[in-house]
Image (cartoon, helix red, strand yellow):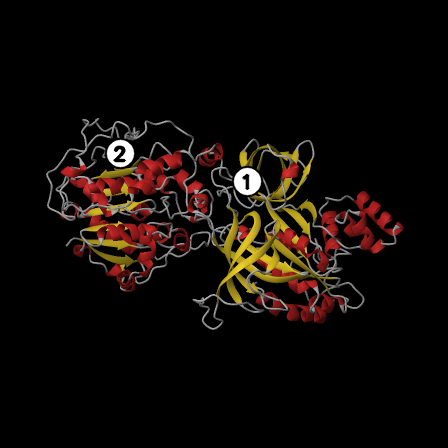
Amino acid sequence: MPSVLFVFTSANKTLTGAQTGWYLPEAAHPYYVLHEKINIDFAAPNGPNPEVDEGSVEMFKDDESVKFLQDPEVKQKFASAKKLSDVNPAEYDAIFYVGGHGPMIDLPEDPNNIKLANAFYQSGKITSAVCHGPGALVGVKDASGKSIFDGRNATGFSDAEEEQVGKVKDVPFLLETRIKELGGKYTKAEQAWGPKVVVDGHVITGQNPASAAVADYNLCSPSNSYRKMSGLNPGAFEFVPGQAFRFRAPQQPATPSAPAQPGQPPAPIERPEPTEPPRPAPSISISIGGPKPPADPAPAPAADQDHKPAPESKPAPPAKQKDAPAAARPKDKFNFTADKSKTTVEAVVQEQQNLVDEETLKDLYGDNTIDPNVKQHLNVVFIGHVDAGKSTMGGQLLFLSGMVDKRTMEKYEREAKEAGRESWYLSWALDSTPQERSKGKTVEVGRAYFETDARRYTILDAPGHKTFVPSMISGAAQADVAILVISARKGEFETGFEKGGQTREHIMLVKTAGVTKLVVVINKMDEPTVEWSEERYKEIKDKITPFIKASGFNPKTDVTFVPVSAYTGANMKEAVSKSVCPWYSGPPLLGLLDTMPMVDRKINGPVMMPISEKYKDMGTIVVGKLESGRIHKNDALLLMPNKTNVDVAAIYNEMEEEINFAYSGDNVRLRIRGVDDEDITPGFVLTSIGRPVHATTQFEAELVILEHKNIICAGYSAVMHVHTLSEEVSLVALLHYFDKKTNRKSKKPPQFAKKGQKIIALIETTAAVCVEPFKLYPQLGRFTLRDEGKTIAIGKVVKLRESVDSAADGVAGLSVAA
């Protein structure tokens, strides 16, 4: 029996830190096609049990993929997987690289992998790879030192496809570009995401999932040995849409092509002119399930298929030849039995061709880089208990950065003095309503902008009073960094931190909202009860740090403490004088913000902009933070969940200046056409037409019950806060609870849940809401539940409950890192 070596990656992180590994269906499908006729062994750089890509497990629930993870024989193969350094190439007839982004991380420069692949390639054995798999071959050379790709016809995951799935920053190189740099004659399908399989000698490469489907069909037909070799990688289904799959390829402009005739097979594998002398085909390519057939000339592409050879290959046009009818095929031939009515090449390609829009073409060919002349942008939310000095600090930052001039600040000071609120004048730069100014309390999220020599900042000043926590959550959902303002005045820190104060709840809520960096600003250090006391500073730091850690922040890497006086401006822009505070040696607040690591932006992802507010001003204006992708003036977008097509008429930045584009992370105002502001609600999401967000009324969620005076049963209702949306929801069923000791899910559903428990519940909304599974898009998958003015639970979306057809229209099937 022939033997094939399946090579897996041992990498579990991409360059951006996103989880990765080997891609489940790219191992499962070819394994079950081949394992009954061929001996298959597993290997990886680090040997046993390489990590699977978690996104692929979440996405692919087809029979083969589920079976593969549970199959005892497969588990044994993983447990006994060889290290690449221990593999003897003489024991195998072919090598097959299982795909995913992981192989791009560790295999290209792994000396053991290069040595192993060289042995297969130089001895004339089948060397095959699909999608990202060819990335494992970039270091392979022949005996003379010539690259495996030099002068060879080859393909692989294209640069455009990498951009469309938003993974450009996750990999060390773009595969198409690297193949060309190595002298390869790179070819790709004429249609975006169309089929392309290239066989050149004993090297087989496939561009993408649709290419695998072509290989599957050709495995069934009695053709020449080159096409039999393509059977070694029939299942590179990394993103192939199917009945159980959640992904649809980015849309392509409708390009008319001749319809396939009933019963007509898909286009055969392109077989360009060989770049090396013909060799006798290895035995494995001719003995899969039957005797060696006579060699046949390669058939021409079917007359109704638009599948032309790549111009650079320039093969001589082969004579047209009809494929043998099914009845003429040898009965003992191995036959791939996928349900072609569901996943035929024609259906896959037609589905993909019907999906591409102008936005996707801009993603493909437009500028993917941020203008280096534009300063990096951070969204900063001020949180903390009422009267800690948040608005005063915001006003001081606007004044110190020059965004509010001295004359305007003097005007605020006069007006505040006349109103008997002299000490509040700095906060009036943010608290602009009469209600806020008269009571000295922020009610809504104040928004302002300033910039330094290094960066641009949007200030989100959240209310501190418990009555306005929903507004605070809305601000936190738009932030990159949280500044927790704490009053050092005697008694005020204790009031804000004890039970009933908002300091603790705010810390937990910003973590739940996705904020990963926390700056704890200990304010009012100039107060007579404090007088820049190091002892008071350390007392507050020591008391609050354990709670911050318990909320999910790492005090060593995620949290920084700074003492300031927002009223006087001490240690805000310039370092506080040593004569005033001799014990503090760190940077001032602005210096700290300017040097913080930037958050990773999903610039190449689909457009996702949750709307925080809307109004009418010479048309419809929507406001929000662009969470993913980029928007250009005149772009066509989709407003979800009401599925309304809109056009971007104008884009305005924080300074109300009209700009031509906005990137992920920017807080912008858009003037849009095609919808009235009365038909928009905060919580709606602007998204790409070709890759819209999901809109659903039911989803499964993992919940942690934080506080509730009674038990929670099925039927319980609360208000869910997710991104900029507030929506009443019901827990229609409690599905599982987690054992505190083992963290394993229960098999039986719990009757109720209580404080301190973690459960999985089925949540239902009255109207469709825009959410995504947390693993794929955290900002649209994390939420809080509130009831009676308290945060009852925090949660994350784990699964959407909807039909396969509607699921395929969303982006949840895209594997893109947070």
- Quarter of image, res 569: bottom right
The label number, if any, that marks residue 267 in the structure image:
2
Q: Classify residue 216 as left or right of residue 239.
A: left
Front residue of 224/737: it is 737
Q: Upstream in the sequence, badge 1 or badge 2?
A: 2
**Where 793 falls versus 134 (above or below)?**
below
Tell me the element at label 1.
loop
Q: Classify residue 12 as left or right of residue 71.
A: right
- Quarter of image, res 755: bottom right
Q: Classify residue 244 as left or right of residue 375.
A: left
**Where 283 falls versus 737 (above or below)?**
above
Residue 766 appears in view: yes
Q: Position of residue 719 (x, y in %)?
A: 62, 56
User: Could you give the CA–CA distance between mark 1 and mark 2, rounded to whole angstroms?
Assistant: 45 Å
Q: Position of residue 28 (x, y in %)?
A: 30, 53
The label number, if any, that marks residue 372 in the structure image:
1
Mark 1 vs mark 2, foreground winner is 2
Tell me the element at label 2.
loop
Front residue of 748/814: it is 748
- Quarter of image, res 616: top right
- Contact, CB < 8 Å: mark 1 with mark 2? no
**Where 737 falls versus 281 (above or below)?**
below
Residue shown at the point (11%, 41%) measured from the top left: 293
